[in-house]
Image: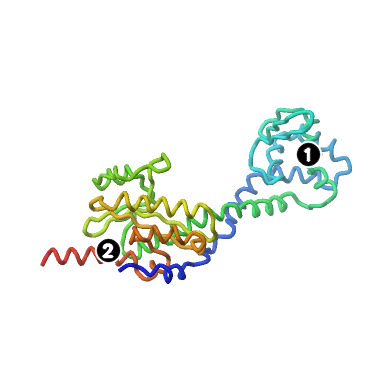
Amino acid sequence: MKKNFESWLLTMKDSIATWGYYTDFEKVYENVNKLKVELNILNSLIGSRNIENEFKSLIIKYPEVIKAIPILLAKREKEIKIIDSKETYVFNFIKMNYSVDQYALFMKNCGLFDLLQNHIINNLVDYVLGVEVGMDTNGRKNRTGDAMEDLVESYLIRAGLEKDKTYFKELNKSEVEKKFGLDLSAISNQDKTEKRFDFVFKGSFGEIYACECNFYSGGGSKLNETARSYKTLALESKNISGFTFVWFTDGIGWNSARHNLEETCDVLDTVYNIQDLENGAIEKLLNIEERIKGMLKV
């Protein structure tokens, strides 16, 4: 039965945040610990009244401390480019490629001497811990996608499917063809790279379901691109025998791209959100096959 799109859209969720969504502290601590020795050496410069000369002496004696400098500026790159009116510099923070004086100039002009000398901070390890927490928030977008995949996977397992036996994670189109003996040549490579599905699961009657998962808490052009892409995929795959494309998506971001989403739903019956999963969407797909199988036995 075709869904009532407007009613269905109202069931979209505003968040999919799990306990570890906001900050990956394990990763934060790991990144800080990698530089803990170097940061503690640099701590000796805090409050120095002769910081420039002390810094020069420090990096001559402990040249390895330079690898901790980029994170003080919230940078992970090991090379930092600086352009001024006289010259373009590309400072290397693995192995010094300029003089000690020029590295001191970098520290001064980027404001790091002032940060250390004037006791704006008391401990670089604590400071970098804060920097890492701030930078980790950039990973939330990826964690949203991972959280949706984890959620879908939990419902695949609840439906009685078993990993690497009746469901598979991250299979390319060619891998699906080889594993299940399907011809997916009708599915184009819209972005010039081979299509990869988040999950592929096998029904009890042999039907192959290839799935995509995503969650959008905010709007943007990406949603329209995704909906159009999956509409194309649905149309291309509808006549492939034994193959069904399934799209699991959610998020109130779809309110800003409702028309493209509705157009995709018009040609793809197997679009489900989290509420659908809670109501047994995967089980219903598998039960449809069971009913067909039973009818054939009669």
Q: Nearer the viewer, mark 2 or mark 1?
A: 2
Identity, as a three-letter code, of the amino acid under mark 1: Met
Viewer-closest of 241 and 100: 241
The residue under the point 42% across, 64% down is 273
First in sequence: mark 2 vs mark 1: 1
Marks 2 and 1 sit apart, C-alpha to C-alpha, by: 63 Å
The answer to which quarter of the image holds residue 111 is top right
- Return the mark for residue 286: 2
Residue 11 lies, in percent from the top left, at 45, 70
Mark 1 surroundings: few (<14), some (14-19) or many (≥20) residues within 10 A: some
Which quarter shows the N terminus?
Answer: bottom left
The residue under the point 41% across, 50% down is 229
Viewer-closest of 199 and 117: 199
173 with respect to 39 (left or right): left
Residue with the most extreme right position:
49
Identity, as a three-letter code, of the amino acid under mark 2: Leu
Please report contact status of discs 2 and 1: CB closer than 8 Å, yes or no: no
Q: Element at badge 2?
A: helix
Q: Visible in this render: residue 69?
A: yes
Residue 93 lies, in percent from the top left, at 68, 35
Residue position for label 1: 107
Residue 50 lies, in percent from the top left, at 88, 40
Viewer-closest of 92 and 50: 92
Residue with the most extreme left position:
298
226 with respect to 53 (left or right): left
